[in-house]
Amino acid sequence: MVNKVEICGVNTSKLPVLSNEEKDKLFKRIHQGDDSARDEFINGNLRLVLSVIQRFNNRGEHVDDLFQVGCIGLIKAIDNFDTSHGVKFSTYAVPMIIGEIRRYLRDNNSIRVSRSLRDIAYKALQAKEKLTNKNSKEPTIGEIAKELEMEKEDVVFALDAIQDPISLFESVYHDGGDAIYVMDQVSDEKNTDENWLENIALNEAIRRLNDREKLILNMRFFQGRTQMEVADEIGISQAQVSRLEKTALMHMRKYI
């Protein structure tokens, strides 16, 4: 996606860049109803759309689709931009483009959320923004629910429903090249059956590990502890736990 030159039939390497002076002149013509100036302004800001969609290149969405949705956000920004506020157009347009893409991703998520639930969530977000502006601080869920005259549980459920899912294999920390993933920080209190080892004939492999490796694997896979919990108990860093765990598993594969 990052290296793709042609998007939706547009050669992105040849997109024009407008100066601030050119933008001001075009906006004057746009406000006078000049459609050709509007088209020229859109074309001159497609690089802005291109820069925004780079943030979403790990979502698995086709770049052409994201680019088209981003263009819708750009057009909305142009139609609603007020030059009298003295704000740069890009400062106003980028959040509009990002918002349009996020709405698209939410509405096309493989995890389907009902329209009524999305409506509640969007109203809650609007109420949150309103209360934040009014009180100069972020409101609590209770305050948002009161503003909407709804139950707190309904607001929480709706807001949770529109959150983007996260992969268990998403990296959350790097230390000397060893990545720590979301799955490394998730404890498992359910799958703690100690008989799994006999079932896959790994007794001999575990017996060959040193005492620290055995302890870490026991706490991680038998007791369902997170790497952070293991690190706190045995007095080393989470990155060290991650390295020792991977080394122990590598040794077991080698023995097997």
Image: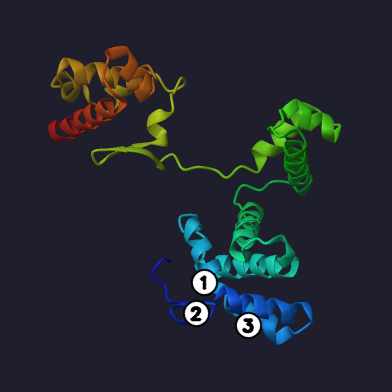
Secondary structure under tag 1 reads helix
Q: Check disc 3: other Cα within 10 Å, few if <14, some if 14-19, many if 20+.
A: some
Viewer-side residue, 139 vs 225? 139
- Which residue is painted at 60% across and 59% down in the image? 91
Which corner quadrant of the image does residue 37 belong to? bottom right
Q: Is residue 46 left or right of residue 241?
A: right
Q: Is residue 175 left or right of residue 126?
A: left
The CA span between labels 3 and 2 is 11 Å
Question: In the rendered structure, which amino acid carries the disc numbered 3?
Answer: Glu
Q: How many marks?
A: 3
Quadrant that contains the N terminus:
bottom left
Residue 204, given in percent of the width and then of the height, sits at 16, 22
Viewer-side residue, 20 vs 50? 20
Determine which residue is flagged by label 1. Answer: 47
Residue 160, given in percent of the width and then of the height, sits at 65, 37
Q: Check disc 1: other Cα within 10 Å, few if <14, some if 14-19, many if 20+.
A: some
Disc 1 to disc 2: CB gap under 8 Å: yes
Of the residues under marks 1 and 3, which one precedes in the sequence? 3
Disc 3 to disc 2: CB gap under 8 Å: no
Whether residue 133 is situated above or below residue 231 in the rendered picture: below
**Color style of the picture:** rainbow
Which corner quadrant of the image does residue 247 belong to? top left
Residue extending farthest to the right is 149
Task: Name the mark on residue 15.
Answer: 2
Question: In the rendered structure, which amino acid carries the disc numbered 1?
Answer: Arg
Determine which residue is flagged by label 3. Answer: 40
Secondary structure under tag 3 reads helix
The CA span between labels 1 and 2 is 7 Å
